[in-house]
Image (spheres, helix red, strand yellow):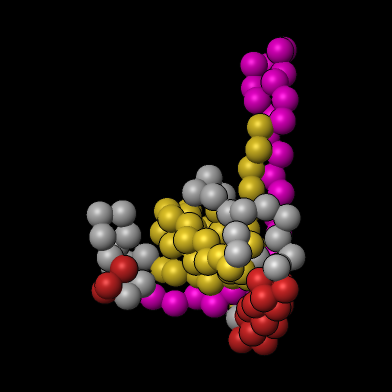
Amino acid sequence: MGLAKGLKKVSSKTLLRLGGTVTIKRTTNSSYNDTSGEVRKIETSVDVKGNLENVSSVEVNDLISQEDKKLSISAEGLTFTPTTKDKVLISAIEYKIVRVNTNEQNNTAIYYDLFLRA
């Protein structure tokens, strides 16, 4: 477990120095209003540092297109694992997550690669 903890810390420090600030938005259903018939949703936003790059031609497949972006973020400091239901806000552009790759050591998440589409 010591190696995973060390790798997580190194990943976080590297992205803090080199990455830009991005916002991960998670929306969850909260409650149903009987009178209006609406579902009230709660949105939680978390600011993290991440490294944004273009998708390489090797990563293009049926799900990932050449126009998509790849965002690497550290798992340290996140209280949840990002999913395809979450959104990412970068420079006032909202992206949807089309795929999440979790990079692990000893079953501990070190960092995530999020494949984004505008």
Q: How many marks?
A: 0
Q: Position of residue 18 (x, y in %)?
A: 61, 86
Q: Position of residue 27 (x, y in %)?
A: 64, 43
Q: Is residue 86 visible?
A: yes
Identify the main secondary structure in magenta.
Answer: strand
Work out which quarter of the rendered image holds the N terminus and state it.
bottom right
Q: Position of residue 58 (x, y in %)?
A: 27, 72
Whether residue 46 appears in magenta in the rendering, the answer is yes
Q: Residue at x 29, y 62 (%)?
A: 65
**In-image side of 9 versus 67 (left or right):** right
> Which quadrant of the structure image shows residue 78?
bottom right
Above or below — where is 31 with respect to 91? Answer: above
Residue stretch in magenta: 30-54
Above or below — where is 13 with respect to 21? Answer: below
Q: Residue at x 73, y 55 (%)?
A: 79
> Which quadrant of the structure image shows residue 74?
bottom right
Nearer to the camera, 31 or 93: 31
> Which quadrant of the structure image shows residue 56?
bottom left
Whether residue 38 appears in magenta in the rendering, the answer is yes
Nearer to the camera, 18 or 77: 77
Work out which quarter of the rendered image holds the C terminus and state it.
bottom left
Q: Residue at x 66, y 32 (%)?
A: 29
Q: Position of residue 2 (x, y in %)?
A: 72, 73
**In-image side of 55 versus 18 (left or right):** left
Q: Is residue 16 visible?
A: no
Above or below — where is 84 with respect to 18? Answer: above
Q: Residue at x 60, y 59 (%)?
A: 107
